[in-house]
Image: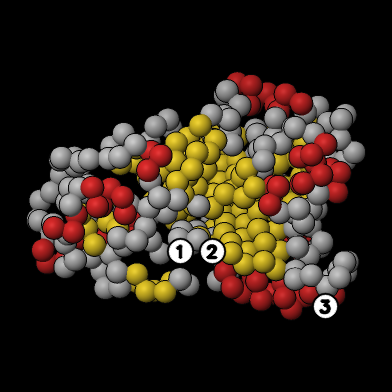
């Protein structure tokens, strides 16, 4: 089963959707069926084809020997989350992830509390107290991990079903098979059973300050998300993914946003492009006076867990930062740079 799952590059998936588009029924006035957006960390493609999710939907019942079904009983015994050891590592913002937690709410997240690499992958977040029946299934294909959530409620006009697929190379896919009331926007407006925010993010800790980096989706900004829609997340090269001086100072990287040159600041023990979310801390700690932009200048032995003399302004002054909430707990999670 290890090679069953598709392992094509990200753009081949998008090209495939474009190629099948003539066979898909579209409505409206000929609006674009694929929307591509980027930020510093991710390239995201929204696919509005009404049958896109069906095309890529993982049919769990065809893989009964491999599929694992998690019942309500399992969640009750494990505080609404279940841990899973994967058979492979997948890449996420500079980390290789092998152990994950599955949430009854509708997400995949880091294992353990307050780890150095807190993250979440959330295609949607549902209030389980308002749900009559729920089911979570997952399959480990050896090069990809697929999870499906299904919910039913007497207050909805239909089932809610969606899935997330995480590939070894870090490509992440959200697919929405069934959405009550016609769209996520209608669902959110009629019922408060789902949160308004979801997406992919990870934490970047700088002493007592935590930035949440990635891409978050606000339902109110995407009223075309409905049954059949898909979202693809591709991680972009970022200096902040490099956690040591030696790794930071490679030749300039190139991504969809252009060329990026990374530099290391010993004072904040961070790798930065000097144009990213670390700009404020870079300036306040005089990193320009001590930056290292050549790997040969890196100290042979350095303590990567200590950043002496670090000065950080209050969170309101960080450029591009805004408060957000953990889609699993509903609690504030500090700064989100999107």
Q: Are marks 1 and 3 in contact (CB under 8 Å)?
A: no
Q: N-terminal of the two: label 1 or label 3? A: 3
Residue situated furthest top in the rendering: 77
Residue 88 visible in the picture: no
Residue situated furthest front in the rendering: 317
The secondary structure type at the circle numbered 3 is: helix
Number of other residues with Cα within 10 Å of mark 1, as a class: few under 14, some 14 to 19, many 20 or more: many
Q: Are marks 2 and 3 in contact (CB under 8 Å)?
A: no
The secondary structure type at the circle numbered 1 is: loop
Looking at the image, residue 180 sits to the left or right of residue 71; the answer is right
Residue 246 image-quadrant placement: bottom left
Q: Are marks 1 and 2 in contact (CB under 8 Å)?
A: yes
The secondary structure type at the circle numbered 2 is: strand
Looking at the image, residue 148 sits to the left or right of residue 154; the answer is left
Q: Residue at x 85, y 49 (%)?
A: 182
Distance from label 1 to label 3 (Cα)?
30 Å
* Disc 3: which residue: 22
25 relative to 200, above or below: below
Q: Of 24 and 326, which appears nearest the observer? A: 326
Q: N-terminal of the two: label 1 or label 2? A: 2
* Disc 1: which residue: 236
Residue 260 in the image, given as x and y percentages of width and height: 34, 69
Number of other residues with Cα within 10 Å of mark 2, as a class: few under 14, some 14 to 19, many 20 or more: some
Q: N-terminal of the two: label 2 or label 3? A: 3
Q: Residue at x 24, y 62 (%)?
A: 263
How many numbered marks are there? 3
Looking at the image, residue 299 sits to the left or right of residue 258; the answer is left
Q: Of 69 and 255, which appears nearest the observer? A: 255
Residue 38 is marked as: 2
Residue 80 in the image, given as x and y percentages of width and height: 61, 26
């Amino acid at each position: 089963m290890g090679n069953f799952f598709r392992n094509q590059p990200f753009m081949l998936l998008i090209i495939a959707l474009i190629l099948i588009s003539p066979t898909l029924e579209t409505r409206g006035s000929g609006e674009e069926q694929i929307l591509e957006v980027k930020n510093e960390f991710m390239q995201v493609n929204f696919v509005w084809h009404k049958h896109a999710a069906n095309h890529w939907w993982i049919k769990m019942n065809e893989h009964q020997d491999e599929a694992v079904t998690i019942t309500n009983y399992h969640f009750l015994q494990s505080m609404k989350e279940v841990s899973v050891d994967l058979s492979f590592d997948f890449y996420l913002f500079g980390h290789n992830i092998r152990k994950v937690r599955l949430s009854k709410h509708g997400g995949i997240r880091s294992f353990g509390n307050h780890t150095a690499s807190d993250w979440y992958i959330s295609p949607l977040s549902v209030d389980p107290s308002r749900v009559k029946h729920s089911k979570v299934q997952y399959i480990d294909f050896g090069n990809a991990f697929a999870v499906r959530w299904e919910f039913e409620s007497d207050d909805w006009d239909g089932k809610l079903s969606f899935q997330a697929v995480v590939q070894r190379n870090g490509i992440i896919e959200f697919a929405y098979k069934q959405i009550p009331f016609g769209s996520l926007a209608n669902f959110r407006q009629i019922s408060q059973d789902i949160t308004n925010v979801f997406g992919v993010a990870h934490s970047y800790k700088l002493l007592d300050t935590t930035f949440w980096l990635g891409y978050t989706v606000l339902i109110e900004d995407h009223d075309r998300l409905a049954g059949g829609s898909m979202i693809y997340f591709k991680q972009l090269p970022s200096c902040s993914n490099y956690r040591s001086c030696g790794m930071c100072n490679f030749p300039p990287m190139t991504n969809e946003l252009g060329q990026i040159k990374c530099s290391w600041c010993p004072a904040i023990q961070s790798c930065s492009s000097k144009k990213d979310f670390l700009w404020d801390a870079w300036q306040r700690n005089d990193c320009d006076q001590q930056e290292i932009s050549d790997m040969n200048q890196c100290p042979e032995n350095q303590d990567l867990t200590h950043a002496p003399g670090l000065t950080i302004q209050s969170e309101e002054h960080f450029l591009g930062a805004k408060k957000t909430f953990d889609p699993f707990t509903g609690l504030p999670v500090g700064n989100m740079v999107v």
